[in-house]
Amino acid sequence: MANDFLFADEPEDQAPQHNGSWKILIVDDEPEVHAVTKLALSDFAFQGKNLEFFSAYSGTEAKKLIETHHDAAIILLDVVMESDDAGLIVARYIREELHNHYVRIILRTGQPGQAPERQVIVNYDINDYKSKTELTAQKLFTVIMSSLRSYRDILSIDNSRRGLEKIITASADLFSSHSMEQFIDGVLQQLTSILGCDDNALLVTSSLVAGNIHENTDPDQLVVFAGLGEFEHQEGRAVSDVLDHTLMDAFHQALRSRSIVYRENYLVAYCTSKFTHGSLLYVSGLPNQVNETQKRLIELFSQNVQIAYENVQLQHEIEDTQREIVYRLSEAVEQRSIETGNHVKRVAFICYELAVAYGLPGDEAEKLMFASPLHDVGKVGIPDGILNKPMKLAEHEWEVMKTHSSIGYEILKNSKRAIIQAGAVIARDHHEKWDGSGYPAGKRGEEIHVYGRIAAVADVYDALRHRRCYKSPWTAEATLAHIESEAGRQFDPRLVEILKSRIDKIEAILTKYPDEE
């Protein structure tokens, strides 16, 4: 009740620079209580943020209010409203049904006997309990200040926990591009939490292949690598399109000085390592004063995040090199049989299309795509006279020719690399037939590895559609008709149907990678 408040002298007015606000929910059935509470706290500020008030006049209204404002910092909750325990019902609803354990609940009552303090504090997860008669303006100021500090610390701990979860999750597979972004997001979240600022942060790299940022870097070449808050899902965009142009001056200063630039409420840090200098860090919503410990943390981050980024770039370079070697060696094998080199590329992309449509997971489809160029690597063991004979092979020559599957498998089988292991399987199984009449082992049906079944369809389709030393190219219609006629005999019937349904995409691959004249 309004007349229950005894106003002491107001604390000395503070006039910090405001940056956002703390949400305070007032739940009481007496309008005067709302008015007096707002008046008493009208000039309150904490960490540069003022208070934003929202009112409810019953327990039912309070439930809807907290659902809408789930990020409320404090709820000043009356016990007795439409019922003697309406406030307690709201408190239980917040904790047990909404599972909101962040908001600080301050219970206010004009009838303490209705809700004994000890019982309420224990049973309802209440953070503070005040009788309206004892809640002077000074005490209201104190309880709000202490509750906001608790709320801030809880959020900080939770942000740190979520950031640490991201880092731990990403550490299991740090060097995949997705996990690297998750890792950087986690570390950014940890950094913003430790600094006590908002969640708006981003890491900037160069759009150039070298990825090297220096004082003469064109601003148009600065792109977002990872971002939090309002910069989430901005990866790949130019920084000049994401940030206000007035902020770009700080980026230029950081580049020129190769250091960390602190402005009113944000920073731009030049990230470097012993090998290269390749990224910039932007964090907004800094507290009014950044202490030396926080500055040291920022320095460590700006150094170590660049090392982590370079490690990922190195891993990608190694993977790209492995894939290029696979392609070039496979093309070298194709050149022995007087065939132009794009056959292996076409087969790889056709395999990927078929694998995805067949239902293989994305990583399996990619593995098959990168490994499929090795399907005929065993031809290195076949004499030129047999490999390039323009007429039908004699029976003994055909027996030699068939050994290329086993030769390829033997060459590749002992590798510890997943792509090479997949290549061994494909080399071994891509000439097996669905009805068991293939070679080298006479496997049938699903005994044939799915990689081999997919590669078989892709290899035959592309081979028939292009000129060989022993034949002219077939039309798409004739090729598809032949493969359809072999469904259930040479080929997995399901894959034949998938090929038919995606023939336009398959033909587009052939058009994109033609044979060289």
Image (tube, helix red, strand yellow):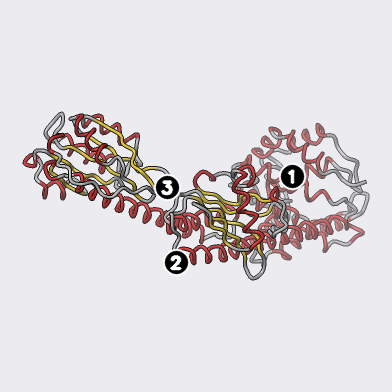
The reply, left or right, for residue 104 in relation to residue 442 is left
Distance between the alpha carbons at the discs numbered 1 and 3: 66 Å
Residue at image position (81%, 31%) is 477
* Mark 1 Cα shell of 10 Å, populated few (<14), some (14-19), many (≥20): many
Q: Are marks 1 and 2 in contact (CB under 8 Å)?
A: no
Residue 152 vertical placement versus 383 (above, below) = above
Q: Nearer the viewer, mark 1 or mark 2?
A: 2
Q: Position of residue 349 (x, y in %)?
A: 73, 45
Q: Amino acid at mark 1?
A: Ala
Residue annotated with mark 3: 17
Residue that lies at the very extreme toward the left in this rendered image: 113
Residue annotated with mark 2: 293
The reply, left or right, for residue 484 in relation to residue 60 is right
The quarter holding residue 140 reads top left
Q: Amino acid at mark 2?
A: Thr
Residue annotated with mark 1: 458
Q: Secondary structure at mark 1?
A: helix
* Mark 2 Cα shell of 10 Å, populated few (<14), some (14-19), many (≥20): few
> Does label 1 or label 3 sit earlier along the sequence?
3
Residue at image position (21%, 32%) is 59
Q: Is residue 424 shown to the viewer in this render?
A: no
* Mark 3 Cα shell of 10 Å, populated few (<14), some (14-19), many (≥20): few
Q: Position of residue 51 (x, y in %)?
A: 33, 41
Q: Secondary structure at mark 2?
A: helix
> Does label 1 or label 2 sit earlier along the sequence?
2
**Which numbered marker is on residue 186?**
none
Distance between the alpha carbons at the discs numbered 2 and 3: 23 Å
